[in-house]
Image (spheres, grey):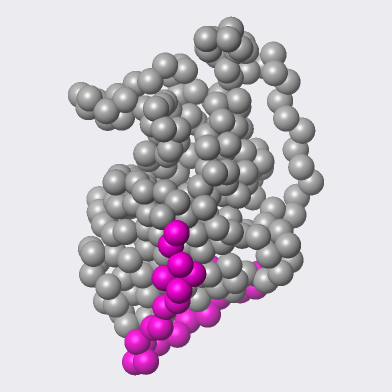
Amino acid sequence: MITRISYIALFFYDLFRYDKHVHIKKLFVIAFILKGGFFAGSQEIVTAERYLEMVAEKYNGVKDYEARIKIRSGNTDMYGTVLHRVPSFLRIDFTSPASQVILFDGELLTVYLPEYRAVLNQAVNSSQRTGGIGASLAGAQGLSLLRRNYAPAFVSGPDPEALDPGSGEMVVKLRLSRRSASEGFREIILCIDPATRLIRRIEGRTLSEGTVRFDFSEIKTNQGIPEGRFIYDAPASANMFNNFLFREAD
């Protein structure tokens, strides 16, 4: 259980942390044209990189975000509600497992595991954040980090395809391949609603060849979620474990 939740927390941590590596130059546009693109009404060729950029532009206008979330890790499914508020607040309250919480307030990643009465904390110091502006799963900064650290390509083409075999729900699928071995996931698949350009599903393949999948539904944006919704008081009887992901926040 702790290993599974650590992978999930690592996914969030990878989006939160500030990448100190030198920016990698973008691939030549012609390379993406050869991989495949499509023509919009203006005859502009929209490559996978450009499509991901348009998704990021959509999220630039999102100030807060709420959705139902389903997380599948191995054969285990978890359900809950995710909240996000710019610039760096994220909270997931689980209904299954009941009372489990993942919280990020811009400086501290906290995971509460009621089954073990344990609170896992991971500090993120100032050198890992860009001027105090964190990133989040459902935010423009998180997508910015993905665009910087992963190279995008269409999974099978630019046209919408079924979310799952036999499903009537259509999405655009992007495959993000890591640019360096330091990233926590080998690749990430994004499934994007072509009408709203909001992310419907994220699936990450771990270094140990496991997968973690996040499904989002009933998405609501710009509701004016207050900062107070991201305050969490852990049970006084819970055991605290600090720096559970890394010994130091390098």
Q: In the rendered image, is residue 92 in sight? A: yes
Image x and y of residue 182, in percent: 64, 50
- Name the residue nearer the viewer: 193 or 246: 193
Residue 98: image quadrant is bottom left
- Tell me if 141 is positioned left or right of 130 in this view: left
**Residue at x 61% of width, y 12% of height:** 44
Q: Which residues are magenta?
A: 224-250
- Name the residue nearer the viewer: 94 or 207: 94
Image x and y of residue 76, in percent: 25, 54
Q: Main secondary structure of the magenta part?
A: loop
Q: Is residue 61 magenta?
A: no
- Tell me if 217 is positioned left or right of 241 in this view: left
Residue at the extreme right: 22
Q: Quadrant of the N terminus?
A: bottom left
**Residue at x 36% of width, y 48% of height:** 220
Q: Quadrant of the C terminus?
A: bottom right
Q: In the rendered image, is residue 8 in sight? A: no
Q: Is residue 244 magenta?
A: yes
Residue 49: image quadrant is top right
Residue 35: image quadrant is top right
- Name the residue nearer the viewer: 141 or 147: 141
